């Protein structure tokens, strides 16, 4: 799917989703980076934050022109080198970076092994890598699953099993590959949940059957109108960290 239609409201609709918590762990895993590549950067939140917090030179790529437009306009966006590209074909020479970052992207790419191979190519020996995905049990407790019950099956088919991703990163030549669960809980006001669902703010909702989607929206609208309280959303993140080349 194209993320262009979502770009304008992307950050607003995804605020408060536990992003800060997992991002702190990613920044810690990348501490000491001097040249960082953010793959699938979206609207540039992480790339700009990393440039500021880590004090590193940062480049970021995304296939969506609209997302990159938002990224360039972000405060601090002038400090990052933005490029339109896909993770399977990174427009950088070998060993150009000493750190790579990928946040909730691996379930969207056409060829995951190609992305991992490209990361291995552009990250220099002893460089670091941080990949963020979800633990597979995350989808069972997703707050919109009661309204769109096919969500767990859709996302279990799309998202990599963290164990498989660890094996793929190791096979590409990274060492010290480790997967760590990071849990966070956020409160989602019911009105916000409804607006997000109507906007199909996550790619999964574009995969839900049209009949199921319409029925879910109708039930969610009914519950909000009846005074449904806020949803408690527990995020089960998986942070995969690794080093390139040296054991």
Image: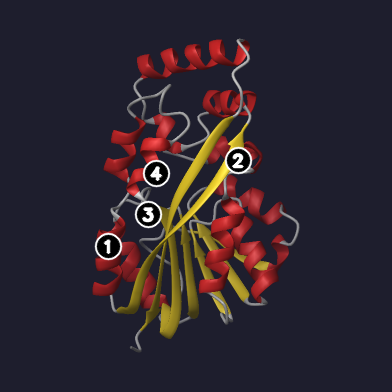
Instruction: Examine the image and state in which quarter residue 232 appears.
Output: top right
Residue 141 horizontal side relative to residue 10, left or right? left
Mark positioned earlier in the residue sequence (3 or 1): 3
Tell me how the rendering is colored: secondary structure
Structural distance between the alpha carbons of marks 3 and 1: 10 Å
Q: Position of residue 106 (x, y in %)?
A: 37, 54
Instruction: Examine the image and state in which quarter residue 51 appears.
Output: bottom right
Q: Nearer the viewer, mark 2 or mark 4?
A: 4
Residue position marked by numbered label 3 in the rendering: 106
Which quarter shows the N terminus? top left
Looking at the image, is 176 positioned above or below residue 182? Answer: below
Could you tell me if the residues under marks 3 and 1 are in contact, i.e. CB atoms within 8 Å?
A: no
Q: Which mark is residue 83?
A: none
Mark positioned earlier in the residue sequence (1 or 2): 2
Residue position marked by numbered label 2 in the rendering: 10
Quick one: label 2, few (<14), some, or many (20+) residues within 10 Å? many
Q: Secondary structure at mark 3?
A: loop
Q: Nearer the viewer, mark 4 or mark 1?
A: 4
Structural distance between the alpha carbons of marks 4 and 1: 23 Å
Residue position marked by numbered label 4 in the rendering: 138
Could you tell me if the residues under marks 3 and 2 are in contact, i.e. CB atoms within 8 Å?
A: no
Q: Secondary structure at mark 2?
A: helix
Q: Position of residue 25 (x, y in %)?
A: 54, 65
Q: Which mark is residue 113?
A: 1
Mark positioned earlier in the residue sequence (2 or 4): 2
Could you tell me if the residues under marks 4 and 3 are in contact, i.e. CB atoms within 8 Å?
A: no
Residue 163 horizontal side relative to residue 67, left or right? left
Q: Secondary structure at mark 4?
A: helix
Q: Secondary structure at mark 1?
A: helix
């Amino acid at each position: 799917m194209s993320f262009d239609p979502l770009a304008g409201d992307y950050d607003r609709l995804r605020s408060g989703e536990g992003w800060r918590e997992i991002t702190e762990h990613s920044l810690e895993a990348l501490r000491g980076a001097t040249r960082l590549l953010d793959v699938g950067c979206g609207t540039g939140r992480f790339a700009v934050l990393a440039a500021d917090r880590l004090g590193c030179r940062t480049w970021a790529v995304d296939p969506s022109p609209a997302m990159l437009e938002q990224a360039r306009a972000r405060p601090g966006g002038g400090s990052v080198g933005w490029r339109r590209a896909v993770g399977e074909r990174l427009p950088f020479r070998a060993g150009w970076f000493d750190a790579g970052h990928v946040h909730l992207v691996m379930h969207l790419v056409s060829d995951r092994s190609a992305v991992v191979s490209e990361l291995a190519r552009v990250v220099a020996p002893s460089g670091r890598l941080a990949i963020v995905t979800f633990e597979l049990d995350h989808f069972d407790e997703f707050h919109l699953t009661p309204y769109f019950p096919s969500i767990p099956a859709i996302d279990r088919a799309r998202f990599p099993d963290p164990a498989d991703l660890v094996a793929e990163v190791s096979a590409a030549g990274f060492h010290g590959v480790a997967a760590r669960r990071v849990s966070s809980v956020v409160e989602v006001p019911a009105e916000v949940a409804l607006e997000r669902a109507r906007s199909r703010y996550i790619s999964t909702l574009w995969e839900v059957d049209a009949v199921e989607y319409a029925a879910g929206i109708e039930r969610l609208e009914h519950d909000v109108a009846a005074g449904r309280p806020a949803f408690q959303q527990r995020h089960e993140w998986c942070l995969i960290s690794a080093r390139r080349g040296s054991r």
